[in-house]
Amino acid sequence: MKTKFITAFLTAALLTAAFTGCNTSTDSSAAPETSAAASNGEAKLEKTTFNLGHLNSTAHLLGFVAKEEGYFEEEGLDVTLTLFSSAAELSSGLENDKLDVAFIGSVPTLTFQSQGHDLTIFGGEMTNGHGYVIKPEFVEGKTDWDVSILKGRNVASVKNSVQDAELQILLKDKGIEIGEGEDKVNIVYFDSQKDAYNALQNDSIDAASAYSPYTSLAESQGYKVVYRCSEEKLLENQPCCRQVAATESLAKYPNSYTAFERALIKAYKFTQENKEQTVKDVKKYIDIEEDLINTEVYGGYGSSVPDPDKQGTVTLKNSIVELGYAEDYDIDKLYNTDIYKNALESLIKENPGDKVYAELQKHFEEFE
């Protein structure tokens, strides 16, 4: 198994500028059904206009690169990217036909599924890439620390998020209770990661969760990293963001979703071979310093891979059920690996001997 289970005015101004990005549209309404030839010439697209919802995170770079490098267009798709602030908003967008695809955190996706939402995971978007940060005065004079440094502290986080679930896993492993008191960790919940991070400006908040690129941004502003999930043995290779769609839509437009997946796989190949341009593409959507983007994307703290990683996600589901985050349910009904499998196989057929695609195929066969 792959997974066992991240001055006040000036800071506010920087955050506002950093995460408005360059998203291309405010209209996320569903598009009419059309018919067109897929780029591989083997299938007809049931529809060509897609709306993709994402968060203000470098984790979602495959969508950014596919758009900027023209891979969606190559596949016969007209894709509009729209920024959302939370997993709940993204889920609602899918269910209200405002979105065709959403990049949603694995934990909220799993909890939504367990609650009866008819949403299916059909691909991956990021592994690891998050953790927690703390105000520097709480680690002053220390050279090494772990999650125990949070005892007696008020920690900002987001309920129903992978960051919160991971923190609870680590605290449980250390025998640390959640609540108020010197030997406990008091978790204060906010509606979004941006709100949780901004809460660090308040005297009452000592630490906060941070998914990419907030961790690097926090370090650049003087905060200290409590831990990154990629460096915690219990959280190795954590499937974070997933590609999610309405189950009915996947069944209705299989060729179009395969074309969408082909574009993301092409984008992944581009990120492996063109790092400098990848950073520039990401900056158009996440407008922070390029060195911070580079750290989050290529610093070894997370990786954006389109593989659905079913094994890892199932293990995560079992972990959050144990935590009480979700009721147990049959995930097989809401997990589609055929879209990715068919997309990758078609690209390998067109590009025999390609090393990047071959590595993806090997990984898929091992963890499907």
Image: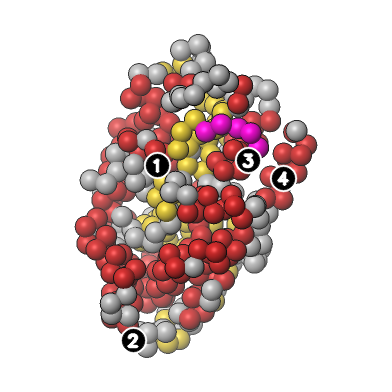
Nearest to viewer (mark 2 / mark 1): 1
Q: Tell me if 246 is positioned left or right of 56 in this view.
A: left
Residue at 21%, 57% (x, y): give it: 366
Which mark is on residue 14? 4
Q: Give, as a three-letter code, the residue at label 1.
A: Ser
CA–CA distance between discs 4 and 3? 12 Å
Local SS, label 1: helix
Q: Quadrant of residue 359?
A: bottom left
Label 4 crowd (10 A; few <14 / some 14-19 / many >=20): some
Q: Is residue 172 magenta?
A: no
In primary-sequence order, the first of circles 1 and 4 is: 4
Residue at 29%, 48% (x, y): give it: 312
Local SS, label 3: helix
Q: Give, as a three-letter code, the residue at label 3.
A: Ser
- Which is nearer the eye, 90 or 103? 103
Local SS, label 4: helix
Which mark is on residue 42? 2
The C terminus is located in which quarter? Answer: bottom left
Nearest to viewer (mark 3 / mark 1): 3
Q: Give, as a three-letter code, the residue at label 2.
A: Glu
